[in-house]
Amino acid sequence: MEFRQLGNSGLQVPVLCFGTGTFGGSTEFFKPWGSTDVAEARELIDLCMEAGVNFFDTADVYSEGRAEEILGAGIAHLPRESVLISTKSTFPFGEGANARGSSRYHLTQQVNGSLKRLKTDYIDVYHMHGFDALTPMEETLSTLNDFVREGKIRYIACSNFSGWHLQRSLDISKQYGWSHYVTHQVYYSLIGRDYEHELMPLGMAEGVGALVWSPLGWGRLTGKLRRGQPAAAGTRASDGLTGSPAVDEEYLYKVVDALDAVAAETGRSVPQVALNWLLRKPTVSSLVIGARTADQLKANLQAAEFSLTLEQVTKLDTASERPLPYPYWHQRQFATRNPAPPSYR
């Protein structure tokens, strides 16, 4: 398994990270994702470890903390230093006006709660799960810096920030000499390339690595969706893709056609090609992959066993290209001064 630097930190992470959103399934929102119990989780975790994937991502809100509990139990038989744990906070957890956000009050409760649920003394990577516009950035960042100094977390990170949210946060950390965000957990896929417009160039300039969530476009790039072919029962696509961005069907089929072509060239599956396309992109440190079964996990792990060629990546780039939003379409008219990010890593 290939390891890459997590942003400009000294931490090396595998290019694939196992996501635990399928653990627990104890709420109506997460039930369609999966309901993996402790025994099943341990089997999947052991498969990851055998493949060299020792990075596990979770969040306090996944099944109201149950996913963290299952992950903690699932790794209990392993030396703590052999695994890397990423978790998150910001979204509502419990009742009350202060049971949400990135305030010192809420984060202090949540980091201590996560440590208990995970049964660990420290968290390797701690994310702000979303941006909190009501809490001063200085309050959030000073709190996170305190956690680092106390040894509760090793590295701080963010998720789902805009470009200015991330840049302002980095500037504040530099101003005060505080720990800074080393990775940004983002939505990025062949059918969701908004990350490339602003956040990728920012990541390249500031050394912020991308930890990609939903790399298969909310299950649309599994190879199971075809023209005139409804989603199979029991899949995420058949469950309505709650919370996912809308995707034009013809655009999706065009991308899937290109994936089919490259899959035939490489002898790989459609999802493996879609995942490998992301691994060829600048700033990408790791992809968060999920699986309900051992067979699904084994198939996804194989996505890191090969490398698409520049020509194959270009074919997929062309099929998935979308009109740029302003001001990027205007800037791109002057490509000699505003070049696109590199297309191949």
Image (cartoon, helix red, strand yellow):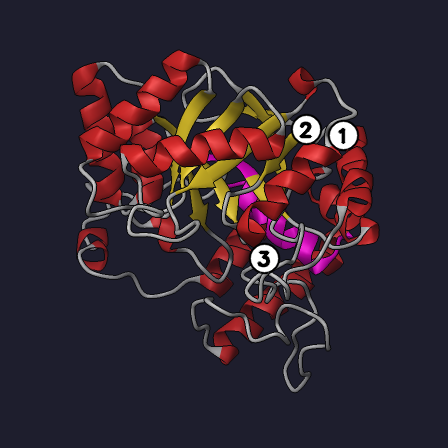
Q: Which residues are magenta?
A: 267-286
Residue 180 visible at all = no
Find disc 2 in the rendering and name its residue: 54
Disc 3, disc 1: CB below 8 Å? Answer: no
Eye-nearest disc, 3 or 2:
2
Disc 2, disc 1: CB below 8 Å? Answer: yes
Q: Secondary structure at mark 1?
A: helix
- Rounded to the nearest angstrom, the CA distance separating label 3 from label 1 is 22 Å
**Residue 49, numbered label:** 1
**Amino acid found under the numbered disc labelled 2:** Asn
As for residue 283 lying within the magenta part, the answer is yes
Find disc 3 in the rendering and name its residue: 216
Left or right: where does residue 340 sit relative to residue 155? left
Disc 3, disc 2: CB below 8 Å? Answer: no
**Amino acid found under the numbered disc labelled 1:** Met
Sort mark 2 into few (<14), some (14-19) or many (20+) by Cα contacts within 10 Å. many
Residues 8 and 96: in front is 96
